[in-house]
Amino acid sequence: MRFTGGMIGSMAVLLTGCDAAALRPAAADGAAIARGREAAVRLGCGACHVLPGVDWPRGRVGPALSEMGDRALIAGRLPNRPDILAHFVRDAPALLPGSAMPALPMRDRDATDIAAWLGSLHAD
Amino acid sequence: MQTDGPLHHDADLARVLDGWPPPVLDPAGPYSEPITVLAWALLIGGTLVLALVLVALGVALFGSGRTKARLGGEKAIWIFGVACPVVVLTGLLVWGLTLTSHLSAGLPTGKEMRVRVIGEMWWWRVHYLDAVGRETVRDANELHIPTGIPVLLELQSADVIHSFWVPRLGGKMDMVPGRTNRLLIQADRPGIYKGQCAEYCGGPHALMGFIVIAHDPADFARWRASRRPAPIAGDLVARGARLFDTVGCAACHTVRGTPADGMAGPDLTHVGSRGTIGAGILPNNAGTLAGWIADSQAIKPGNRMPPYRQLSADDLRALTAYMASRR
């Protein structure tokens, strides 16, 4: 079965029960990217992931997040779109049951900002 | 939104580590105020003395013969070389000792809240004591206090020398193996006050942090009353509780009300309610908990908890949910 963007978006809504509109990122601007990096550090994403440009902590439980903007898929399963990524960082088990990445408490804006930041990470 | 048990949706808690490192000249109580006054007095006094010396140096190098002669005369030596240092340093000594004499404490008087804090490599054991010194509640890496009253800390060490330091609330006091050192702290306003081990104690010393959470007295009474083991509710949490006792966690950690009674690591009865994990270094949420359980060595290299890379994703989520639910 081939997923279309719209289907994935609807799935996300169905699965999470969240308001998808709230997590639809505006065009990623520099401010959102900077806020996203700050939110990722503040929430402790580094406990499991190497965050590019962050010296500590450098977690090894999950994948390093460098070049996340170049990846085709999130966690090898979901299309790497900003709205899906925003859902995923906040509630991974809803989109990928069985993922070790837990649901994380964060504001809507933190989720979209983190997605914007991740989307901005490209190979040099 | 699907959740793995109670999550911290508390924005304040997520920001518990904002403002790290803690400011050292921003007193928030009567036991840190005198230190700030003394620090500024020494800084300003030292600057004035330096200025005086530089002026004297300038005169000695570039002054006229007559001023040089006066500067090197017997009278000047007696005044500036002997009398001034004796008077200034003696005055400073007496003033400094008087100003800071009440910061370290003698035996409890019965008016203070008493807590024993034991330094460990590289975390803090926290035992709340009653008025006669019996343990009431055990916790780790976090101290809850009421505002407005002195808190008498009985500082000990289980291994090497550590130093307890919450700069905004009081002085710095070494924790020496075999001794009990007493230190008073007090917060005048509710808030979160950060601390740090201030004596190099090996490997991850720099990652040995601490937080003090000051509540107004009514909130503190509520917090104190809430210190009962949380019930085990829900399938995921129940599965996590079983795993805790079977995969090895219970060998080192205690969760009161369960068979887990290990003593080597922090008591986890209330770990889900703590503001931080890893001893004051990361905000406590489901993600950082999972990261810590699976591979704490990547976060705090050298700490004494082995990585649990053998856990399946489901097991890791169950253990994380169990830990987060221990509130």
Image (tube, helix red, strand yellow):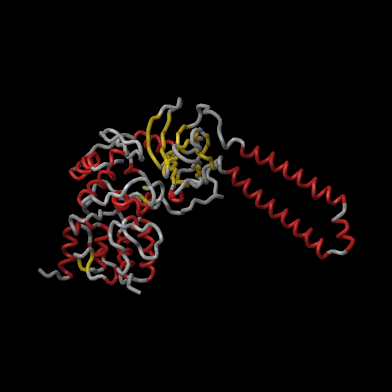
Residue B183 rendering spot, x and y as whole percentages: 53, 36
On the rendered structure, is B66 left or right of B195? right
Residue B296 rendering spot, x and y as whole percentages: 34, 50
Residue B188 rendering spot, x and y as whole percentages: 51, 41
Which residue extends farthest bottom? A124
Q: Residue at x 37, y 49 (%)?
A: B13
Q: In the displayed structure, would residue B126 be above or below residue A117? A: above
Residue A11, by quadrant, is: bottom left
Q: Which residue is drawn at 42% across and 51% down?
A: B17
Q: In the displayed structure, would residue B214 be above or below residue B75? A: above
On the rendered structure, is A31 left or right of A101? right
Please tell me which residue lies in front, B264 or B321: B264
Residue A123, by quadrant, is: bottom left
Please tell me which residue lies in front, B101 or B9: B101
Q: In the displayed structure, would residue A3 be above or below residue B129? A: below
Q: How many labels does the image show?
A: 0
Please tell me which residue lies in front, B6 or A98: A98
